[in-house]
Amino acid sequence: MNWTSVLVSLLLLLASGATGSLVLLYRSQRLRTRERAYGLDTPNLRQIGAGIGAATGLAVGALILYFAVHTNRFDLIEWVGRSSYLLVAGASGGHIFVLVYAAIHIVQEERAWKNGSGRGKPREGTLGRRRLEQLRDFSREYGHYTDLKSRDDEVVDDLTGVLGGPLVNTRHDLARIPFYGYLGTVCGILLMAQELGHIGETTEPFEVLRSMAKGLVLAFQTTLVALLAFLPLRKMTDYLMRRLGALEEEWTKARDEVAGPARRS
């Protein structure tokens, strides 16, 4: 490689990293806007988003460079199949950011609730604090437990939705990752079919196998990469959903403690 190729490669990596960083910075800003409505503030959210975005962008840029270096001739179907890797990498980075964001808050809420629910209130700037304050307001406002329960259920659903909403969206969007792998699978099979169409009677068996191998590798490898990305992300999403569900149960149990007089009426 000459110095021009090295310079272009570095510029591509820098551009990819900067693009990924900007995308997740924009997403972190949207999350911060939603947080302010509930009095929350995630520490270093922008830095986390910028770091994960930069790493994702660099991974995408490195893949593009790798494919460019190992390509002898341009084949549209082959490059469409290779885009499967880029889609999986980009989607995984976005999902990892949301999971890290949710994990930070769930751990904070669990600790705050455990340390503060039995001593009056969890610390300021948590959903648990807001949950208890609104519950005590309702216990003074509503004399009948049925009315209190109906209104309080709406509050619990709203508060858990602050963290549950991004997790539910992530669980839904994760289903796309295997389909990105199937894109590479289809393109790999098409490459094999193309090569088979070029085989003549005088073609050596070794040449037949070698021409088919490239498409076969693309077909299976893209599916494998997509599944390897999907499975741990889905497991982590389900795990955080269970943690959030347990926290929601704790918030619901607090109603019986705070609203005892209203329940007996």
Image (cartoon, grey):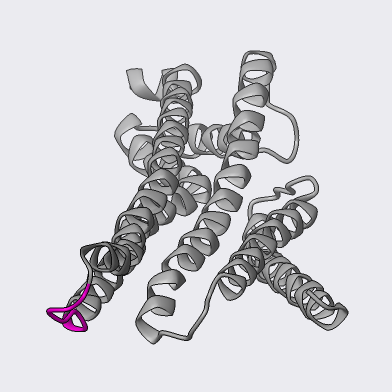
Which residue is at the far right? 3
Quadrant assignment, res 20: bottom right
Please determine whether, in this image, residue 4 is positioned above or below residue 228.
Answer: below
Could you tell me which residue is drawn at 73 percent across and 61 percent down? 54
| The residue stretch that appears in magenta | 197-203
Please determine whether, in this image, residue 86 is positioned above or below residue 15.
Answer: above
Between 181 and 115, the residue placed more toward the observer is 181
Please determine whether, in this image, residue 1 is positioned above or below residue 123.
Answer: below
Could you tell me which residue is drawn at 44 percent across and 78 percent down? 79
Q: Position of residue 57 (x, y in %)?
A: 66, 65
Which residue is at the far left? 201
Could you tell me which residue is drawn at 39 percent across and 77 percent down? 78
Please determine whether, in this image, residue 18 is positioned above or below residue 111.
Answer: below
Quadrant assignment, res 90: bottom right
The mark tally for this picture is 0
137 displayed left or right of 53: left
Between 103 and 264, the residue placed more toward the observer is 103
Quadrant assignment, res 157: top left
Magenta segment's dominant SS is loop
34 displayed left or right of 40: left
- Which quadrant would the N terminus be assigned to in this image? bottom right
Q: Position of residue 235 (x, y in %)?
A: 40, 35
Could you tell me which residue is drawn at 41 percent across and 56 percent down? 169
Q: Position of residue 104 (x, y in %)?
A: 65, 37
Q: Position of residue 13 (x, y in %)?
A: 74, 70
- Which quadrant would the C terminus be assigned to in this image? top left
Residue 199 belongs to magenta span? yes
Between 154 and 87, the residue placed more toward the observer is 87
